[in-house]
Image (cartoon, rainbow, N blue to C red):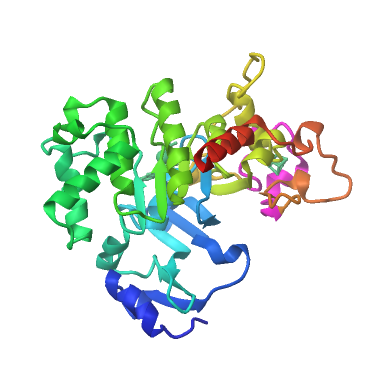
Amino acid sequence: MSDPVTTDSLELQDQLHLSDAVVSAQPTEKGPASDLVLEVKNLSVDYGWGENAVRAVNAVSLDVHRSQILGIAGESGSGKSTLVYGLTRLLRAPGVIAGGDVKLNLGKDTEGNQISIDILKASESELRKVRWSQVSIVLQSALSALNPVLRISKEFEEILKSHRSDMKKHERRARAVELLGMVGLEEDRLDRFPHELSGGQRQRIMIALALALDPQLVIMDEPTTALDVVTQREIINELADLRARFGFAMIFITHDLSLLVELADEICVMYAGVIVERAPADALYSAPRHPYTLGLLNSAPPLHGERVELEGIPGSPPDLADMPTGCSFHARCPYKMERCVTEVPPLLASDSTGRVVACWLHSGDLGVTVPEELGRTVSITPASKIRAATNSKEAS
Ligand SMILES: Nc1ncnc2c1ncn2[C@@H]1O[C@H](COP(=O)(O)OP(=O)(O)OP(=O)(O)O)[C@@H](O)[C@H]1O
Ligand code: SF4
Ligand SMILES: [Mg+2]
């Protein structure tokens, strides 16, 4: 049960104009739980109602820690965008939240109590206060998200004006210039219209807008998919640098698992609306446990080494309106067993890396032999060396 809201936490609550109903202040826990920014428990999202409803996200739980980059990967239609629309309450009809809890931790009051907001219970006006300032999101359609008739400066003006009413005009301009600099753009871009900028520049502006109010959590839904590979790479490196400098947490969504391996600390692999494997990026890359993760890795060019023929995953994801029984991947899985067709595999802890995986091969049942390719030893990959190099460059 929540502790009563304290006087100090009321000050923070007051700044954000949040009601008692959605805010709690709890004594800070010790250990990793104390730096959680986002806690999602059993979130389910449907499209449609009653008999016609299809479940696009099914009882997904995840945590995001301060400064962590959590990657979410999966084929088209696996529910990645629906998950973040649901947890930020940006869903549009016929999307409906069917259940779950989403807690955003706003920081600590002077007594060290953690102040949290219950996102699924907050009113629309309370959510507006928290969006941009505490959590910001760059949507999949971001390249067309800038208003075509507004100069870029106006976009920054509007966000800063509505959330930082104490800022003067010249201060807002200075902040906009600073933000553009952070994403490698010159001041003159502020006076342009969106059509006068390249796709990469527009995407950088969306990222700068997302960072405008120093949110503690930034959500990026396929922010680089529409860009060429070189620009994509530049933006990924900039995001890693910005995270190292400012310490915000990030959820980064993409269907490109190899890209995530380089950027993310931890990766969730989604299939048909559920997380089938979650593991530190190194562990997932060097030693995948779920056959679908292995399939995704085999579909992407390797990060280093010789060129190899890509295998791909046979078949296509299931129809949400006609989900198979048992493991939803069984029709495409080369390791399918009898049990897989009738029983849904639970998400279970798998090894000492903190990994969880939903596959009967790893349930510890006697008589099941784990294939060599799904039982490899975890090793430190070039991906973690790249991140370590980035971090030490920042530190020096
Ligand atoms: N407005 C909608 N009405 C009905 N079904 C929808 C709607 N939007 C998404 N869906 C369904 O929900 C499922 C998840 O879609 P979602 O867009 O979340 O997937 P995704 O993983 O983000 O895919 P992509 O990689 O293509 O962006 C899909 O089966 C999709 O068809
Ligand atoms: S539970 Fe069975 S069908 Fe599903 S991924 Fe594991 S082995 Fe394949
Ligand atoms: Mg999507």
Please state the extent of the stretch shown in magenta in the rendering: 325-348
Q: Can you say whether 325 is above or below 304 in the image?
A: below
Q: Is residue 317 visible?
A: no
In the rendered image, residue 335, in percent from the top left (x then y), is placed at 74, 35
- Nearest to the observer: residue 358 or residue 50: 358
Q: Is residue 376 visible?
A: yes
Magenta stretch mostly in which secondary structure?
loop
Residue 235, picture quadrant: top left
Residue 90, picture quadrant: bottom left
In the rendered image, residue 325, in percent from the top left (x then y), is placed at 63, 47
In the rendered image, residue 21, in percent from the top left (x then y), is placed at 36, 78
In the rendered image, residue 382, in percent from the top left (x then y), is placed at 65, 30
For this view, does 254 lie left or right of residue 201?
Answer: right
Which residue is located at x 51 percent, y 46 percent? 69
Q: Can you say whether 56 is above or below 257 in the image?
A: below
Magenta stretch contains residue 362: no
Q: Quadrant of ligand 3?
A: top left
Which residue is located at x 33 percent, y 48 percent? 211
Q: Can you say whether 50 is above or below 393 in the image?
A: below
For this view, does 194 lie left or right of residue 84?
Answer: left
